[in-house]
Image (cartoon, rainbow, N blue to C red):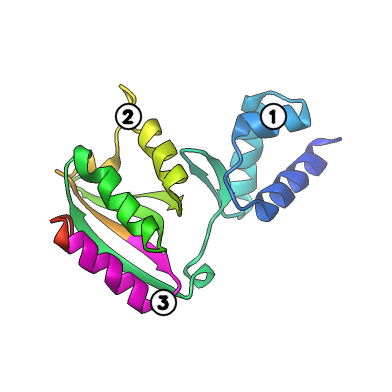
Amino acid sequence: MDTNERRREIIIQLTNSNTPISASTLAEHFSVSRQIIVGDVALLRAEGHDIVSTPRGYIIKATDTDYPYVGMIACRHDSRQMKDELYTIVDFGGTVIDVTIEHSIYGEISGLLNLSSRYEVDMFIKDVSGENDKPLSTISGGIHLHRIGCKSEEIFNLIKEKLKEQGILL
């Protein structure tokens, strides 16, 4: 398989996957190094493909049209409340699309999350619990925004109500 074929196949695999695919998994599949895959993805992005790196691997960027309703919430909490916040959102049927903070030098900084189950939340919490890896909200004193995808505005409002009861919603 030549380089162009491999890159086309990477796009096909990412498009057909409902979950992120790690560079290591792609490297193993194509019998190349992880660094080759990282380079392929960088070039695919430069060609205009909406490939996003998440803590669990690469995905094709979801758009707001992937959800019947998308709302935004502003939250503030410490690291101990992060699991409660994310569990509440997914338990009531929401998907945490991303997180955004305001940085004094760089402006808005966002990270794609795409968390829609307790398992995905647990994996994310594990990833950001390392010595060198911290959630974005630690930069902004715990203040951050989430876009949440839902089946309806009613579900979104229920999520907001529960987060308010927990003292997490700003």
Q: CA distance from mark 3 to mark 1?
A: 39 Å
Q: Residues within 10 Å of mark 2 (few under 14, many from 20)?
A: few
Q: Circle 3 is placed at which residue position?
A: 152
**Secondary structure category for the residue under label 2:** loop
Q: Residue at x 26, y 57 (%)?
A: 145
Identified at 76% across, 48% down, the residue is 8
- Residues shaded magenta: 147-164
- In magenta segment, residue 7: no
- Say whether marks 3 and 1 touch (CB < 8 Å): no
Label 2 sits on what residue type? Answer: Ser
Q: Which mark is residue 129?
A: 2
* Label 1 vs label 2, nearer the camera: 2
Position of residue 133 relative to residue 102, above or below, is above
Circle 1 residue: 27
Amino acid found under the numbered disc labelled 1: Ala
Q: Earlier in the sequence, mark 3 or mark 2?
A: 2
